[in-house]
Image (tube, grey):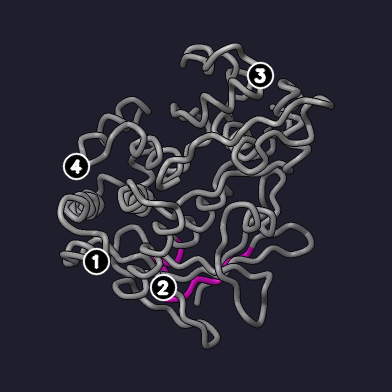
Amino acid sequence: MEQFATTPRGHFVLAQANRYFGGWPTLAGDPDAIVMAFPVEGWRTSAAVVVRQDDAGVVSGEVFGADAQDAESAWRTALAAVSLDHDGSGFAEVGQRDPLIGRLQEHFGLMRPVCFHSPYEAAAALVIGHRMSIVQTRAVRAKLSAEHGDTLTLEGQQFHAFPRPHVLMEVDRFGPLFGEKMERLHGIAEAALAGLLDRERLRAMPVAEALADLRSLRGVGAFIAQGILIRGAGLADEVSDDEVTSQAFQYAYELPQVPDRATILQIAEPWRPYRAWATVLLHMWLRREGGPSFQRPGRQRRPEPRRRAGD
């Protein structure tokens, strides 16, 4: 077991992140401690990271199942999953530049996005979720992890990591995953083993180049490529280009029609360098509450948009 700790740069509440986004399991003897289990980039092993936050705000992690080299990588992965690898000290200023975002920050708190453990897991999850409900997708991923992922035991509890890429490549069929969908998952696994889905590699690339690179993978279109890059690699300053984002901008800013990309980017310009974080707040408003209390009195609530499989 290796131990790590960090003091968040900017506001961060672990319990809030888990309540809104994570849904991670907790330790029976310490319900405030969340447990993340995942394959570690490099794919030699999987790890379980027990993450806690003390009263002073310090976030600590205990890494199990990995040697010293992989343990440090696992800790960095855990931080990236809750966007703690970014300096969030300037996020509140976005709400001062854009009062609407400020009201959202007040309503939800200065929420940082919760991301997938890795671009590899993001790609696999989004491919699995294509044409499936969210509930079904989560059930398939959990069962796949339990049967083919590494099992880590902590305090008598078992936690299952998603299958490492070389293991996933050996699975020919798993419930609703067969045929073309399984071929796509094998392609994702091959790309991960080749290093094409490493978080730092994707972050270092120009966004357009990274998206084009991801779209070259079998079955990965524009929507999934954005998910891999923004929610998998964990970019903080990008605005997703999808139906939900367009609807959120239209409703929140009272636009007469669905805005085009140029209009969206113009509105989001004051959010730099946290455009992805502010976009997540808009998504939370639209999808979780359909028109929350920060709207003017008497405003009719907007209907929730149609959700896409895998979201």
Does the CB distance between marks 4 and 3 fall below 8 Å?
no
Q: CA distance from mark 2 to mark 1?
A: 17 Å
Q: CA distance from mark 3 to mark 2?
A: 42 Å
First of labels 2, 1 by sequence position: 2
Q: Which residue is mark 4?
A: 218
For the question of whether residue 277 can be seen, the reply is no
Does the CB distance between marks 1 and 3 fall below 8 Å?
no
Q: Which residue is mark 3?
A: 253
View extreme (right): residue: 297
- 260 left or right of 168 in image: right
First of labels 1, 3 by sequence position: 1
Q: Secondary structure at mark 3?
A: loop
- Which amino acid type is shown beneath numbered disc 2? His
Residue at 79%, 35% in the rendered image:
293
Nearer to us of marks 4 and 3 is 3
First of labels 4, 3 by sequence position: 4
